[in-house]
Amino acid sequence: MLNVLKKISLLFFLFFAFSHQSRSQHPVSFFTKEESLLVRSNLNTQPLLNESFQALKKETDFWLNKEVDVPLPKDPAGGYTHEKHKANYLLMFNSGVLYNITGEQKYADLVRNILLKYATLNPTLKNHPQATSTSPGRIFWQALNDANWMVYSGMAFDLVYNGLNEADRKIIEEGAFKPEVDFVTKDLSPWFNLIHNHAVWATAGVGMIGIATNNQTYIDLALEGTQHNGSSGFYALLDHLFSPDGYYTEGPYYTRYALLPFIIFSNALNNKYPSKNIFTYRNSILKKAINTAIQYSNTDGKFFAFNDAMKDKDYTTGEMVMALDIYTKAYGLDTTFLPIAKKQHNLLLTKSGIQLAEALNNPKNKSVVFPYKTIENTDGAKGNKGGVSILRSGEGKELTSLIYKYTSHGLSHGHYDKLNINLFDKGNEILQDYGAARFVGVEQKYGGRYLPENTGFATQTIAHNTMVVDETSHFNGNEKIAEQFWPVKNYSNFKNEKVLAISVSDSNAYKNVILKRSLFMLTLPDQPKLIIDIFHTQSSKTHQYDLPFYYLGQFIHSSVEYTYAKNTMYPLGQKNGYQYLWKEGEAKVIDATVQMTFLNERDFYTISTLVTDTASILFARIGANDQNFNLRRDPAFIIRKNSTSPSFISVIEVHGKYDPVNEVTSNANSIVQKIQELENSSLFSVVKITLKTGELIVVECKNDNSTTSNHQYRYNNTDLIWKGPYLILLNGKNINY
């Protein structure tokens, strides 16, 4: 009996010891020790992997024999202390990676020395002196950056855990980490519990420190929020920030930014708790999110800049390098991503990095471009809050992308731009979204924060290619109201890649005004690419309606005679973004098809628009009342109508070539000759577009969006019969399908 008890006791001890060891195994945050050894063994056989290793080593070795400054925080973004603390957490992370791959203690010592300095600094810090929001930071001017520090510093601590003695670990845990965790989870608990990209970083930061320090309380806070009821925390963020198909509600720019903490913390969780199956959570939502994020980029890799967004961010950023690596680990190698990995030319020093290196070296993987495609995403956690569609035609360098945005507001980074469109062609932005007014990291420009012109102009409706009524922004520029509403898609049809169609309506942006915009992208043999843009309004009262097109390129020609403001220019209005637009010219037009042609790089683009009765054509330029030159001086072409329910019918045409080297121009003139609205009744909208090459007829049903309904319309003494919500005829032939 005694022997049996001894055996049971021994088994219990071994089980406890094993369980304790598995719970406290290090490293697990970024990779495991086995993974790091695999990287070491492949450095000499994988050139790109070794190149990435040598670059990291060179950058880190520079600091091995130097005193690393951990300064008292005082500067906003772009200032010395801000940039130094940011550089410090990246240095610690990189040094931790090198410690595991090389096995050299000097890299662990570098991390130790820096973290001990933070252990002395952090307990003394109060709110940052440059803080301007309700979520101030301690190390940085905003808590978001503190959360960044926590993510990377937590990983660094985990990576060198085995190279630290117990006394130093305790000092770092209590001095460097506990003040930061307490600050964001207690002092800033409402912020920590938000459904927002800030909270993604905050929960990932606290969770990463929890994993690094074997602190289950921190891990639980990260996963469940401070209220522990499922309304906040990492799981809630996965549930609420993505639609079921992977669209991130704040837009592509913030998808990139939020993806990093989502995927890096998920990676750490998966390493420590593989039974949680975090990468299959919510039908593999992170897999969908990464795929979607890349689809929301231009052929040059830059992310489409709607909502608050900087236009220079592309998929070569560190966040997307991390995303492709962890995607490969979690979901397997996807060879369609290899053109992106090739452009990134930077591999993580992981098992997945080895896989990507091998795939890039494999001559069978010859794909040179990422396969962009027409996609349609819903918005909202349940996919019921509008969405975004990207209509694409062509491939490679000839790709044309039309972005149609009909999402919910997009939280605090959203803009007031329901039914907004943007156009990219041959890698160039043609009809632009201004994006955000901000110079990230440039201290001279408002400390790198959002500029006053961001809310004054960039977020306002007039800054977008969509309808403005009575010079007021959608929802009167009120975020709380805007968050409650979203447009409704009437129909879409992307089965025929030569004729892409979508229609969306909104009845909430303006009181007692209904907006409906239908788009048809046509790619037809021996024709320029045409985008038919039919924008209907409906109201019982007279309003001023403005439809701007923010074009990028050189003005070439307009069919209207306009008056140019040659001596004195005035702002277009006094508020809601109009005060930032110079009125450079104006034309009064009666019953005409108005055309404006511009040149972007070596391609011509023409906007042809129908004016029935009277309208004003305004030539405007950003920059009025901008005494600090914070805004770009970009042009706009604005169609203004005063009526109850006017239609705005336009054709956007991609045509012609300009060769400045050989001084040769071809097809520089539009093929659109005339646009007519034949009917706009309660049953049908009928538009006739006369081309040099023939005739287009677009018939759209007003009150039946069913794809199975049969319809009949009499035109030119002929009964047109079709099925579905619209009909398009080219020279009498149905080209719908």
Image (tube, rainbow, N blue to C red):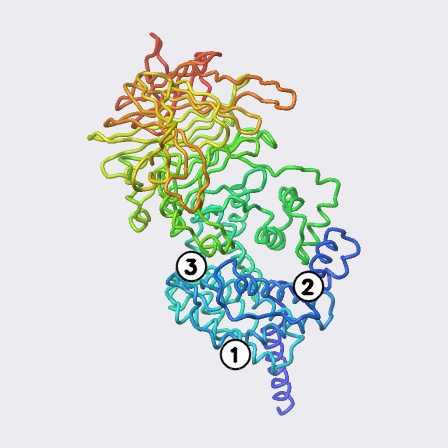
- Position of 659 compared to 195: left or right? right
Q: Nearer the viewer, residue 73 or 629?
A: 629
Which label number is shown at residue 283?
none
Q: Is residue 51 above or below residue 463?
A: below
Please name the residue shown 69% across and 67% down the image. 100
Label 3: few (<14), some or many (≥20) within 10 Å?
some
Residue 335 position in % (x across, y down): 65, 43
Secondary structure of the residue carrying numbered label 1: helix
Q: Is residue 343 above or below residue 649?
A: below
Which label number is shown at residue 174?
1
Q: Farthest residue to the front: give it.
A: 567
- Position of 646 compared to 140: left or right? left
Dot 1 and dot 2 residues touching (CB under 8 Å)? no
Q: How many marks?
A: 3
Q: Which residue is mark 2?
A: 60
In primary-sequence order, the first of circles 3 and 2 is 2
Which label number is shown at residue 236?
3
Real-space Cα separation, disc 3 to disc 2, in angstroms? 37 Å
Q: Amino acid at mark 3?
A: Ala
Residue 214 sits in quarter = bottom right
Label 1: few (<14), some or many (≥20) within 10 Å?
some
Residue 622 position in % (x across, y down): 41, 37
In primary-sequence order, the first of circles 1 and 2 is 2
Residue 351 sits in quarter = bottom right
